[in-house]
Image (tube, grey):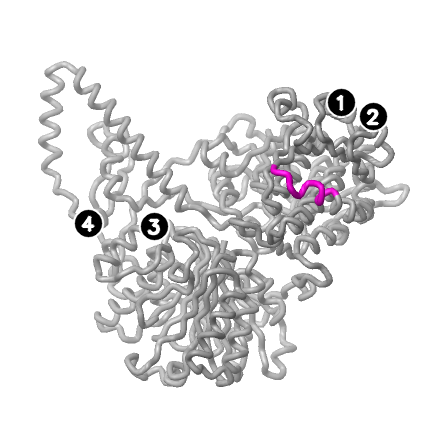
Amino acid sequence: MCGIFAYLNYNVNRERRYILEVLFNGLRRLEYRGYDSAGISIDSSLSASLSRDPNSPLSLRVPPLVFRQEGRIESLVKSVYENVAATDLDLEESFCAHAGIAHTRWATHGEPAPRNSHPQTSDPGNEFLVVHNGVITNYQVLKETLVRHGFTFESETDTEVIPKLAKFVFDKANEEGDHGVTFSQVVLEVMRHLEGAYALIFKSQHYPNELIACKRGGPLLLGVKEFSEGIAASSFHDFNVLKNGKPKELFLSSDANALVEHTKKVLMIEDGEVVHLKDGVVSIFKFDNDKGKNCGALSRTASVQRALSILEMEVEQINKGSYEHYMQKEIHEQPESLKTTMRGRLIRGGSCKAKSVLLGGLKDHLKTIRRSRRIVFIGCGTSYNAALAARPILEELSGIPVTMEIASDLVDRQGPIYREDTAVFVSQSGETADTLQALQYASENGALCVGITNTVGSAIARNTHCGVHINAGAEIGVASTKAYTSQIVVMAMVSLAIAGDTISNQERRDAVIDGLYDLPNKVRDVLELDQEMKELAKLLIAEQSLLVFGRGYNYATALEGALKVKEVALMHSEGMLAGEMKHGPLALVDENLPIVVIATRDACFSKQQSVIQQLHARKGRLIVICSKGDAASVSPGGLCRIIEVPQVVDCLQPVINIVPLQLLAYHLTVLRGYNVDQPRNLAKRELLNELFISRLRLLGQVILMMLLLALKVKAYVERPQVNRDEDRTLLRTLQNVPPVEGPLEQEIVGQSAGEQTGGWQGEGVLNEETPSVLLPELAQTQLELPVNPANTEGNAGLEERPESPISSSRIPLTEVALSVSFISVRS
């Protein structure tokens, strides 16, 4: 959704020009995450010199420089250097220590504009600056509270509340005599009042040459580059690397892509951690939401120890090399990415040994998966299509029913998930918003959660019970290509692992394993169609619509091919199940509409031949993808445009068939003059749309409240007179309850079942405690919601399920003003 980056040099002299270029290059590496606006913040000359004396009065310091610009990164670069020239800022000035932050934005709150770009600031003096990736779901409540305390807001973003809240916390602590409040204490208190998913980096005049990073849900990494002799050869797991205070450069980034050119020593920051960079030392604190709620001062949290790890990535992986675009590069990398995906996992024994698959991440859970009542694939977009392509082979080999769920739809309708289910979550990034919410829902309902992702250390990798990394390598183009084919291959190997070594399907398993070994070479062959697909794209450049028909294994190919065309070429395209052609889509067919039909050799081949005949009879403009040698079979009379692809085992054919459609989408986009790697309105990773979901839930609560109230009024009117008299007595009693002074002044706490009185289930009482000494009006309401009971039928013999990695059945409700009315009518 957004990319955040920071650079801090300690006891290493760096010129301002060098610092700017490091920040700009970091943003360029992250631009695929958002590209409608960008911004950076660096120190001015006077503020930097005074920052060497922490005791210098704030009134003497010049605020940090903030540059924000609408448009892509290069627009920001141009704007910064124009401002530098206009103000005579010395680019050659050297800094022994300096902290700079940067941000590239994908707009969620407020239009792309400088005022809505990051860094967002606390005040005109830039006392606190923040760059943010994610969504703050309770920002409106925080904003209203801060306005009452005299703050004014300039932007339409949810982020602006964060630096202003930091300033409020800092000023409040100093008013109460706590002049030694640390940067980490301020940030921990700010986190206590934030809801949503976020990754944040803080910079402040009050804490010169320091940075604070924290996260809850969003990805964030720390990179460490040392300069002292002897340390460079030290162990990557040496805790002293973070604590030695010797000359070093420190980097913070949303993605490893921006770190690999500087260092391979990284720390993956975990949810709830606060990382404080000061004097060359990295201190890590664990956020505890309960600690400090009822104490009279800011809490002091003990630091924790973490070890660095080695980043398994090369700079060449994130460069375009000889290719013009990342999407083009990633399409042509697929033979190698498939090899990497399968490396060490396929066991091709000799004449006496059976062929098999070894997936270390699943081996301890295979027995549980085999006993599942069903397997549920859950994903979004391309990941959903990959799972759909793998579903037939999994059902065939395992004999277990497999169902498909779009993550957002599963969460919206609260579909049934049981303890005996295995839920498989597929996501390239491992950070997809809807998939994470579905993961939490499935975990709360007791299902075994399996992750399939391309990103080590991602939220899905951390929060599932087990899983498999697809190892496709960095994918920077927004439109997923090589991750899609690697996902299909991984799920085919998962199917083989679950099937085990049963004799009944041994021949089929051996054929699939042989097909996997040959697959990279077959993909390399189909890539030779590049020029042919470019010529086809020239014929389709002026078209407005495209239909893609597929069936069986290739229904997913039709969906994915159409998705690629629409997301990068900005052409309307639809993937359709060929079996449904006569139930509506046939009405669209004429001599002008281009139609792609996937008719490679499999169990559905004869049916696809019939589809081609019907479309041809209605003068359809057909483009047929078929197996080599089948041109005459699918195009009688030679009236169709034929694209021949290599033949492989049917369950792996979708990997082959999607490549021509990827090439077609790429060339269509280039010929139409659009940006292939950064399509309109899209970004690589979606990080939590909880704000919109929470508002929809609130709207649903209001509607439910009104309906229930209407029913109660109707029931009251229809009741006998004696019952009405009793109700009037009860109403007079309830009217004696003291009114709530403000929507945020009290905490509503749902009573337990044993405390309920008067037959009102879940009736609320007022609690006079104020959870935060600094912001008592920001107390958050939490209602205990029951978790759906697991279906206990057929549990005999099931292994004990590990404790859910996401244990959250408490849902915060910030709209306290409405919650009073809602609780009172819930019965």
Which of the two discs, 2 and 4, labels the residue nearer the N terminus?
Answer: 2
From the image, tell me which residue sits under label 2.
Answer: 636
Taking the image as shown, residue 613 lies to the left or right of residue 555, namely right
Pointer 3 and pointer 1: residues touching (CB < 8 Å)? no
Q: In the rendered image, is residue 466 in sight?
A: no
User: For mark 2, does the 10 Å Cα neighbourhood hold few (<14), some (14 to 19), or many (20 or more) residues?
Assistant: few
The image quadrant that residue 213 belongs to is bottom left
Which of the two discs, 3 and 4, labels the residue nearer the N terminus?
Answer: 3
Check residue 768 in the rendering and tell me which mark sits there, or answer none.
4
Q: Amino acid at mark 3?
A: Asn
Whole-percent x, y for residue 684 in the image: 56, 52
Q: Amino acid at mark 2?
A: Pro
Residue 48 magenta-drawn? no
Whole-percent x, y for residue 545 in the image: 62, 36
Taking the image as shown, residue 7 lies to the left or right of residue 778, namely right
* Residue furthest right as drawn: 351
From the image, tell me which residue sits under label 1.
Answer: 613
User: For mark 1, does the 10 Å Cα neighbourhood hold few (<14), some (14 to 19), or many (20 or more) residues?
Assistant: some
Q: Amino acid at mark 1?
A: Gln
Whole-percent x, y for residue 253 in the image: 53, 64
| Region in magenta | 536-544
From the image, tell me which residue sits under label 3.
Answer: 138
